[in-house]
Amino acid sequence: MAKFAVIGGYTAEAWSKMIDNPGDRVAAVQKVAQAAGGKLEQFFWSFGDDDYLAIIDAPDDISAAAVSIAVGSSGSLRNLRTIRLITPEEGRQVLEKAKAAKAAYSPPGAKTAAAVR
């Protein structure tokens, strides 16, 4: 399972409804994550541009995207983003691949071996 951060804010209308009837947002997020084959690991409310941060374990990118689309389609959220989180071990693997890819890359304007001939 991969980890994803789901971040965003509530609309003014959603805040108004939550004030009148707070409910359990954690249970709601758990339910939608499970419906897509995932699991809610943590949920936080926050200050600033974003009102919440959910950390979700999902089997793949498609499942994580399904969670975001499902909650985003409600119209209760704004600035919804889903970010694939990379573990330190995955980060090391990314850097190893990047090293090989960097050796093969020619930036714009660079002379390639074929152009020098």
Image (spheres, helix red, strand yellow):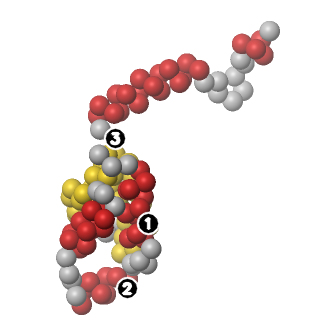
Q: Is residue 43 above or below residue 13?
A: above
Q: In the rendering, at what x and y percent does residue 84 appear?
A: 38, 48
Q: In the rendering, at what x and y percent does residue 60 appear?
A: 38, 49
Residue beneath disc 1: 69
Q: Is residue 42 above or below residue 72?
A: above
From where the camera sits, is residue 29 visible?
Answer: yes
Q: In front of the other: label 3 or label 1?
A: 1
Q: In front of the other: label 3 or label 2?
A: 3
Q: Which mark is residue 90?
A: none
- Give the mark nearer the N terminus: 1 vs 2: 2
Residue beneath disc 2: 13
Q: Residue at x 43, y 78 (%)?
A: 75
CA distance separating discs 1 and 2: 19 Å
CA distance separating discs 3 and 1: 21 Å
Q: Residue at x 31, y 65 (%)?
A: 35
Q: Residue at x 31, y 87 (%)?
A: 16
Neighbours of disc 3 within 10 Å: few (<14), some (14-19), many (20+) = few
The image quadrant where one finds the C terminus is top right
Q: Amino acid at mark 1?
A: Ile
- The answer to which of 23 and 15 lies nearer the viewer is 23
Residue beneath disc 3: 86
Disc 3, SS = loop
Q: In the rendering, at what x and y percent does residue 74 appear?
A: 41, 77
Disc 1, SS = helix
- The answer to which of 4 and 111 lies nearer the viewer is 4
Neighbours of disc 1 within 10 Å: few (<14), some (14-19), many (20+) = few
Q: In the rendering, at what x and y percent does residue 73 appear?
A: 45, 74
57 sits to left or right of 100:
left
Q: Residue at x 72, y 18 (%)?
A: 111
- Give the mark nearer the N terminus: 3 vs 1: 1
Which quadrant holds residue 78?
A: bottom left
